[in-house]
Amino acid sequence: MMSNQFVTAINCMDGRVQEPVIQWMKEKYNATYVDMITEAGPNKTLLYGSGEDRKRIMDKVDISYHNHGSKVLAIVGHHDCAGYSLEDSTKKDKIKTNVQTFRNLDYEMEIIGLFVNADFEVEVVID
């Protein structure tokens, strides 16, 4: 398996979902580090936030991609999110929409969608 020193996740700030995502990405991609870009309800911010808020997230993705050489970007949502309260199935659809948006940008990265369920297990929504 190819080793990726850095991978990247746009994840919720909710501390309950940090470690499951970090562990999953390290194992899945044989990564040493996970650049974690956090936001309260990041899928909501990416879809409906101000241009300034979206730019702040994109600037961090740029740093991870250009400066750390990250080859993987995960866009993450989770069950029971206080920052973006939706049914799980709707949240997964929003994750898919954000993944498609990032795939249309100029990143040579694998861009995936992850969902952390009620048992704090990571599910692949779109790969």
Image: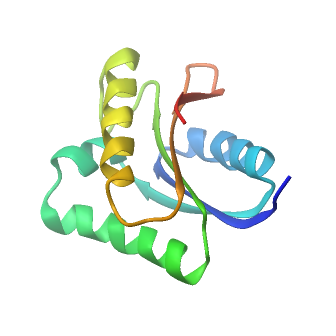
* Residue 121 percent coordinates (x, y): 66, 26
Q: Nearer the viewer, residue 95 or 40?
A: 95
- Position of the C terminus, as image quadrant, is top right
* Residue 65 percent coordinates (x, y): 52, 72
Q: Is residue 34 above or below residue 20?
A: below
**Count of marks overlaid on the render:** 0
* Residue 68 percent coordinates (x, y): 61, 78
Residue 112 visible somewhere in the drawing: yes
Q: Say which residue appears at 40% left-offset and 18% top-offset.
A: 88
* Residue 73 percent coordinates (x, y): 53, 55
Q: In the picture provided, is 68 more to the left or to the right than 125?
A: right
How was this image coloured?
rainbow
Residue 16, by quadrant, is top right
Residue 84, by quadrant, is top left
The residue lying furthest to the right in this view is: 1
Residue 6, by quadrant, is bottom right
Q: Is residue 126 above or below residue 27?
A: above
Q: Is residue 12 above or below residue 31?
A: above
Q: In the picture provided, is 62 more to the left or to the right than 64?
A: left
The residue lying furthest to the bottom in this view is: 67
Q: Nearer the viewer, residue 66 or 56?
A: 66
Q: In the picture provided, is 83 more to the left or to the right than 20?
A: left
Q: In the picture provided, is 27 more to the left or to the right than 98?
A: right
Residue 41 visible somewhere in the drawing: no
Q: Say which residue appears at 16% left-offset and 46% top-offset.
A: 48
